[in-house]
Amino acid sequence: MFKYSYIYVIVFLDLISISLIIPVWGTHLRNLGASHFHIALLGSTYSFLQFLSGTPVGALSDRYGRKIVLFVTICICAVAYFLLGCVESFILIVLIRIIQGCLKHSQLLCKTLVNDQVPPDQQTAVYGRMNGFSSLSFVIGPIIGGHLMEKSEGFYSLTCYTSVIFLINALVVWTTVPNITIKKERKSASPFNDLMEVNWKECWPAFSLKMLGAAALFAYFSSVGLAMNEKFNLSPSEAGYTGALQGLTGGITGFTAGKIENIFPTKNPFTKCFYSFILLGSGFIGLTLAPNIIIFMAAMIPISASSTLIRGFNNEIMYEQSSSDHKGLIAGAGASATAISRFVAPILCGFIMDKFGNNSGFLLSALFSFTGALLSICLAKRSKFHVE
């Protein structure tokens, strides 16, 4: 079962190091004097650099080997995260995040390891276990990070621990990963190629729903940490427990998605997206109206569950509406579409929050969600899927 356990270890260590910082990152930047818009712009810049640099980093791993590229990028990220705890200038933080945005592609390279090492009939199971370890890291990491943040020089200590985990991960990579190179001619690759080659007349419904769902979630992630801190004055450890609750809910939903799907009164994935978007938007409204942290945390549960379901239903739509020889292209284009939302939504959210306050970020997420619900029900009436 765990023949490819080294991949699971790399994925887990990579994400637990990130999840240590995520719940307190926005609060730290606010303490340094950054506005909501500046924080959102920094996050969007990081996402855009990830979008641009993913293809070149993948090409480098083809040429020089997965092992060496993964090892070098992890080591550089270890140094970069340590430096984040040493500087207090927002400009220097931006420069460090630019380096991280260009090189932090551990998850992408782990997926290429799966494609290289795992037989096709076993890849689905391996990806499922990777998702399980990813969810586990986001249950454990925010709790540990929250408690570390409360100690003296908390953020500095947090970045030191994060850097150490990256170095441990680099050691795991060096001692376990086979150095695989792909000796074949490559066409000149660009992250925009997938979007240019897609038959948009066929695939626009799936991509539109994917972008709306991603926009709702990225706007939410941009605002939830700051909202908890400024609305309820939570301590870092309390914020960590709320992040763990969300990770746990997403993990449970992912493992039980098949059983949950049977509850829906229809087999039409557009209709199932409609119900899920309604649940998602209702959760965001609940966050906006929550008078205390208990109700706030309760509203996070349907958000985490419905967002997991939406991703699954959207994949069903994409693959059903694409021919068998274009599924890889559609998957790549879907990732590019998500990256666009990841870039645009936080900037828009930060601007709105500066103008109208913390709750406006949740209302923006609700707007994206209910727009997705409206589009889903319109598409359900004209789709080729049969309601049973």
Image: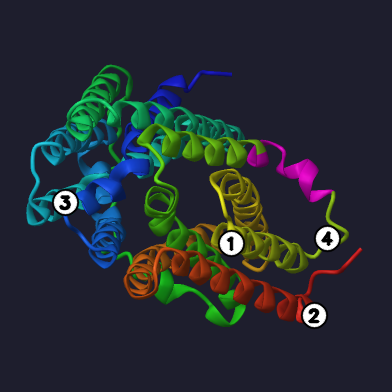
Instruction: Check disc 2 and give the amino acid type.
Output: Lys
Mark 4 vs 3, N-terminal side: 3
CA gap between label 2 and label 3 equals: 51 Å
Q: Quadrant of the C terminus?
A: bottom right
Q: Position of residue 50 (x, y in %)?
A: 28, 55
Q: Position of residue 27 (x, y in %)?
A: 29, 48
Q: Is residue 257 magenta?
A: yes
Could one spot residue 332 in this view of the protein? no
CA gap between label 4 and label 3 equals: 50 Å
Instruction: Check disc 1 and give the amino acid type.
Output: Leu
Mark 3 vs 1, N-terminal side: 3
Q: Which mark is residue 289?
A: 1
The way the protein has been coloured in the rendering is rainbow
Instruction: Check disc 4 and give the amino acid type.
Output: Lys
Residue occupied by mark 2:
381
CA gap between label 4 and label 2 equals: 13 Å
The answer to whether residue 257 is left or right of residue 304 is right
Secondary structure beneath label 2: helix
Residue farthest to the right? Answer: 388
The answer to whether residue 224 is left or right of residue 249 is left
Q: Is residue 160 above or below residue 23?
A: above
Q: Are marks 4 and 1 in contact (CB under 8 Å)?
A: no
The answer to whether residue 332 is left or right of residue 85 is right
Q: Which segment is the magenta one?
A: 253-262
Most common secondary structure along the magenta stretch: helix
Instruction: Tell me the residue at 71%/78% (across/down).
Output: 379
Mark 2 vs 3, N-terminal side: 3
Secondary structure beneath label 4: loop
Instruction: Tell me the residue at 88%/67% (across/down).
Output: 387
Q: Of tags 2 and 1, which is closer to the observer?
A: 1
